[in-house]
Image: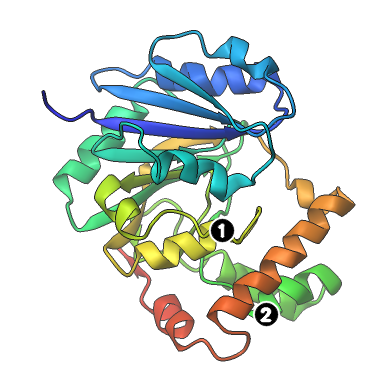
């Protein structure tokens, strides 16, 4: 039997059922590919299980909030059937029926890429600037403390790679938002998935830079999905604290002010 085309992991925690249902439906309506969806539930109850009745969905209940990356690792590093490609997907994304097939076809035709992100758009069709350089200490902390400084805004423009067109293919992106990460599964397995030390935030920056050590990352705006989420950490003190803790963990791991690899990777971005 030939290998399944795609496995999809969704980590959920007390999500709005209507929003999650739309995300699941976006995958289920996909055409001309074989796939399996894994819904990994970190919620305190199993209320969301009711959305997982399709035979192509496997519901996994953790009975604990183990975090975003560790939730995905249940599937990535566990004894679950995985496809040639694996999609790390947020539960607040939706897209057209041809998106996953076109994404897989693109990677089938471009073996140099191990990770792809499509254009991520708002419901009104505008781009979300989620394609990034690796962050420095200034990018993270000064933006929080002094967001209105002109120099802070200039740094943020570079951090979000606005110096490269969001309408062009760009490769060697060192930091791709974790809302939609389509991996060549062999690359994802080779880097052992997410670093479980991050509960939430910065786990995607960490994973993407490690994936880039194995194969090229690419942003392909010929394909697009819609992301409905807001930046919750800006409105919740608890999430804000988690965000800061993860930032400290990230810089402690990779270097606070001296990170030669960060400097190199941030310079190697290439527009096609």
Model colouring: rainbow
Which residue occupies the foreground of this view, 19 or 66?
A: 66
Which residue is drawn at the image coordinates 76% and 70% (left, top)? Answer: 143
Q: Secondary structure at mark 2?
A: helix
Q: Which residue in the protein does label 1 denote?
A: 203
Q: Is residue 57 visible?
A: yes
Q: Is residue 93 visible?
A: no
Which residue is drawn at the image coordinates 60% and 15% (left, top)? Answer: 49
Left or right of residue 124, residue 207 in this image: left
Q: Which residue in the protein does label 2 denote?
A: 137
Q: Residue furthest bottom?
A: 258
Q: Position of residue 148 (x, y in %)?
A: 83, 70
Which residue occupies the foreground of this view, 29 or 42?
A: 42
Tell me the quarter of the image containing the N terminus: top left
Q: Secondary structure at mark 1?
A: helix
Count numbered badges in the picture: 2
Which residue is drawn at the image coordinates 39% and 14% (left, top)? Answer: 29
Distance from Cα at disc 2 to Cα at disc 1: 16 Å
């Amino acid at each position: 039997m030939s290998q399944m085309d795609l496995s999809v992991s969704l980590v959920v925690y007390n999500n709005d059922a209507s929003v999650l249902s739309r995300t699941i439906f976006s995958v289920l309506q996909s055409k001309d590919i074989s796939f399996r969806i894994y819904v990994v539930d970190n919620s305190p109850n199993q209320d969301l299980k009711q959305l997982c009745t399709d035979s192509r969905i496997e519901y996994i209940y953790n009975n604990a909030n183990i975090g975003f990356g560790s939730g995905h690792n249940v599937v990535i590093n566990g004894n679950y059937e995985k496809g040639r490609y694996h999609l790390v997907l947020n539960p607040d994304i939706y897209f057209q029926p041809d998106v996953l097939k076109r994404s897989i076809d693109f990677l089938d035709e471009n073996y140099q890429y191990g990770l792809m992100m499509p254009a991520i758009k708002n419901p009104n069709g505008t781009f979300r600037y989620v394609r990034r350089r690796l962050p420095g200490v200034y990018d993270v902390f000064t933006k929080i403390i002094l967001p209105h400084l002109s120099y802070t805004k200039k740094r943020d423009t570079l951090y979000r790679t606005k110096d490269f067109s969001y309408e062009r293919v760009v490769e060697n992106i060192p930091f791709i938002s974790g809302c939609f990460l389509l991996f060549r599964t062999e690359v994802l397995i080779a880097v052992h998935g997410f670093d479980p030390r991050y509960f939430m935030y910065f786990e995607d920056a960490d994973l993407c830079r490690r994936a880039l050590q194995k194969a090229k990352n690419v942003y392909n705006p010929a394909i697009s999905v819609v992301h409905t989420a807001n930046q919750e950490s800006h409105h919740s003190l608890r999430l804000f604290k988690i965000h800061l803790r993860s930032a400290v963990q990230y810089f402690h791991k990779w270097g606070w002010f001296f990170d030669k690899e960060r400097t190199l990777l941030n310079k190697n971005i290439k527009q096609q």
